[in-house]
Image: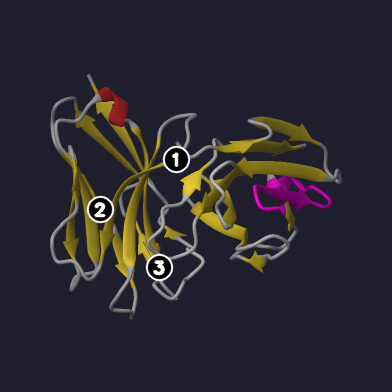
Amino acid sequence: DVKVTQSSRYLVKRTGEKVFLECVQDMDHENMFWYRQDPGLGLRLIYFSYDVKMKEKGDIPEGYSVSREKKERFSLILESASTNQTSMYLCASSFPGHRETQYFGPGTRLLVL
Amino acid sequence: AQTVTQSQPEMSVQEAETVTLSCTYDTSESDYYLFWYKQPPSRQMILVIRQEAYKQQNATENRFSVNFQKAAKSFSLKISDSQLGDAAMYFCAYRSPGESQGNLIFGKGTKLSVKP
């Protein structure tokens, strides 16, 4: 079975803190994704990566950055957390190609105070 | 740009009954992929069913089936013999064939409750 894990299920941070959300997959997937999930808005793509050290902006990249130093790990970074970044963050991975299924992690619920 | 619309924020069904969740999408492309994902409470999102636009036959997976109407740009999910474990958020998603990296466009979701 594909396994996508995220470092924390729940996280509480203060405004202005630097926040790291980690995602690890064990299926040797080339593609990895970070989504933000908010009630009534569905899932919105923040960033994705199709290879090590490669990254592409999604629909809502502002206020976020990413890092992919190893194939299995994709990190989402909030350089200076703000209250409007309180949300559920979902990581996903897949093989390349539009027929491929995306596999999701359990999510990290982030609260910024 | 493609959009995906789920017009039912919440739905409810009696256990063992059948329920249909609606999804419409807007695209100018002729070839694409459509997905239904399920997100149970506090659990991981999983793929329920997938449909290739070039296939006329509706996809089925056990109790889950779709009604794919390409001309109407409609992709509804039917759950037969509903079970308590079907209670979840359901997301409809679209993928363009040009999106070689596999980016998905999601609808806003439908919360399904199952009454015992």
Mark positioned earlier in the residue sequence (1 or 3)? 3
Image mark 3: chain: B
Q: How many marks?
A: 3
Q: Is residue A77 magenta?
A: yes
Residue labelled with disc 3: B3
- Report the side of B4 relative to A90 (left or right): left
For badge 3, the amino acid type reads: Thr
**Chain name for mark 1:** B
Q: Residue A63: x percent and y percent? A: 75, 58
Per the model, the C-alpha gap separating discs 2 and 1 is 19 Å
Q: Which residue is identified by label 2?
A: B22
Cβ atoms under marks 2 and 1 closer than 8 Å = no
In the rendered image of this protein, does residue B116 appear above or below residue B28?
A: above
Residue type, label 1: Met
Which contiguous range is marked in magenta? A70-85
Considering depth in this image, is B32 or B88 the residue closer to the camera?
A: B32
Disc 1/disc 3 C-alpha distance (Å) = 20 Å
| Mark number, residue B45 | 1
Query: Which quadrant holds residue A30?
Result: bottom right
- The image quarter containing residue B6 is bottom left
Circle nearer the viewer, 1 or 3: 1
